[in-house]
């Protein structure tokens, strides 16, 4: 697994630190899109800040690309409005909006050199040759292709072609750059490299980026904020940290990364922050943090990320009441170098728990956990998150 440090952690002094923020504020108000009886977008409203790297994340068919196409002007909404700063751009045709789009397919002209592909938007505006030469070279250097101008697209790799497409989209200096799954045609290693390059480009130019992806690792890696979409609706907007650590629904917890779900009933309210919940499938009662207001008798669904859970063949000592401890048996384990994934059977119904153990020191320096071993697993109740509450 790979990732950049989330921007919410990298830019603790502000979204772009001291860099001058450019681009446009993008406001989507009550946008709906219907194709016949099929409601693709259902009353979407969101605001994207100037200079923000904002991602639309969701599974295929959730409406994220349709929303991007409406912002670009390639689709008209059934109802609603899209504002760039204070101007409603819905009546404005796509070629008149200060917006450019980078697609999954590179859409380069195969018969033109790389220089002329990047220069194409300037040629349409009849910019003088001297300015064209300087601007094209500037943007080829921006995407780290300063010596490739004389080549044809067929002579470049996939990653290089996508950089050319990005340079061409940026050379008109749009206030918003839209990116529709721009890396999905690349292999995993190249996608990782291009993601870092794309992030660096955004940091240099500082305009508003709106990035569509179904890959949660991509969205978490580069975004200032993420809007998670499902079935035509925005179900949560937040920083990558908030989306991952504090999912608002079971769908988000499941879609973003890996997690464990357990269902139980509140048996006691311990204080304003903690409650006792009985989990029948585990044969245990555990303490939970009250992320949502609970009352005795509520049915709840709790999620715990596998990397938050600790595991050992030895019973943990010295833990206070805020820690939950369970016993189980190793049903399966998968070693992947930097970590091992354990699948642990817990309780009378043999509920499966996933536990990820990071290898932070030499593996043979500690007692190995093997298949069929009896083990203890434990986590702090702050690390569990309630994603669903059903009152009596």
Image (cartoon, rainbow, N blue to C red):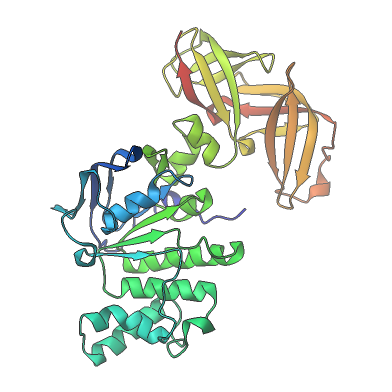
Q: Indicate whether 145 appears above or below 298.
A: below
Q: Is residue 388 visible?
A: yes
Along the line of sight, the residue nearer the viewer: 131 or 384 = 131
Q: Residue 14: tell me if it is visible.
A: no
Q: Is residue 153 above or below residue 334?
A: below
Q: Position of residue 183 (x, y in %)?
A: 49, 62
Callout count: 0
Quarter of the image for residue 381 reads top right
Of 318 and 364, the residue lying toward us: 364
Q: Is residue 270 left or right of residue 286?
A: left
Residue 146 location (% of width, % of height)? 43, 85
Q: Residue at x 44, y 50 (%)?
A: 9
Task: Write down the quadrant of residue 199 in the picture.
Answer: bottom left
Residue 253 drawn at (x, y percent): 52, 35
Residue farthest to the front, as pictured: 36
At 67% from the left and 17% from the top, the residue drawn is 281
Residue positioned 42% across, 43% down in the render: 62
Q: Nearer the viewer, residue 297 or 112?
A: 112
Vertically, is 48 above or below 180? above
- Locate residue 353, reporting x and y percent: 69, 30
Q: Tell me which residue sits at (57%, 67%) in the image.
A: 190
């Amino acid at each position: 697994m790979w990732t950049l440090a989330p921007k919410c952690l990298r830019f603790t002094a502000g979204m772009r630190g001291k860099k001058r923020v450019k681009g446009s504020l993008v406001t989507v108000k009550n946008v709906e899109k219907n194709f016949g009886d099929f409601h693709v977008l259902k009353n979407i409203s969101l605001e994207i800040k100037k200079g923000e790297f904002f991602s639309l994340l969701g599974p295929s068919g959730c409406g994220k690309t349709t929303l991007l196409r409406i912002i670009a002007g390639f689709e008209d909404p059934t109802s609603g409005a899209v504002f760039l700063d204070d101007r409603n751009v819905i009546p404005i045709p796509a070629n008149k909006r200060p917006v450019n789009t980078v697609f999954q397919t590179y859409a380069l002209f195969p018969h033109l050199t790389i220089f002329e592909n990047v220069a194409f938007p300037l040629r349409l505006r009849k910019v003088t040759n001297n300015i064209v030469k300087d601007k094209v070279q500037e943007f080829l250097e921006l995407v780290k292709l300063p010596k490739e101008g004389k080549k044809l697209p067929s002579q470049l790799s996939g990653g290089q072609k996508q950089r050319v497409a990005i340079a061409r989209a940026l050379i008109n200096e749009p206030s918003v750059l839209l990116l529709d799954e721009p890396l999905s045609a690349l292999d995993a290693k190249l996608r990782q490299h291009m993601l870092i390059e794309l992030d660096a480009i955004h940091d240099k130019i500082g305009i508003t980026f709106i990035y569509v992806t179904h890959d949660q690792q991509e969205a978490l890696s580069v975004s200032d904020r993420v809007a998670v979409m499902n079935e035509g609706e925005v179900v949560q907007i937040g920083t990558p940290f908030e989306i991952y650590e504090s999912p608002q629904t079971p769908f988000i917890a499941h879609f973003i990364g890996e997690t464990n779900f357990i269902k139980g009933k509140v048996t006691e309210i311990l204080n304003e922050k903690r409650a006792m919940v009985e989990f029948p499938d585990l044969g245990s009662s555990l303490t939970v943090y009250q992320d949502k207001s609970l009352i005795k008798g509520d049915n709840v669904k709790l999620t715990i990320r596998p990397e938050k859970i600790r595991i050992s063949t030895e019973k943990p000592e010295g833990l206070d009441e805020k820690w939950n401890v369970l016993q189980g048996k190793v049903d399966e384990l998968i070693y992947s170098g930097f970590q091992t994934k354990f699948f642990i059977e817990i309780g009378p119904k043999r509920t499966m728990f996933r536990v990820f153990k990071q290898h932070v020191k030499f593996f043979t320096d500690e007692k190995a956990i093997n298949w069929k071993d009896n083990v203890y697993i434990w986590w702090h109740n702050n690390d569990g998150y309630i994603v669903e509450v059903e009152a009596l």
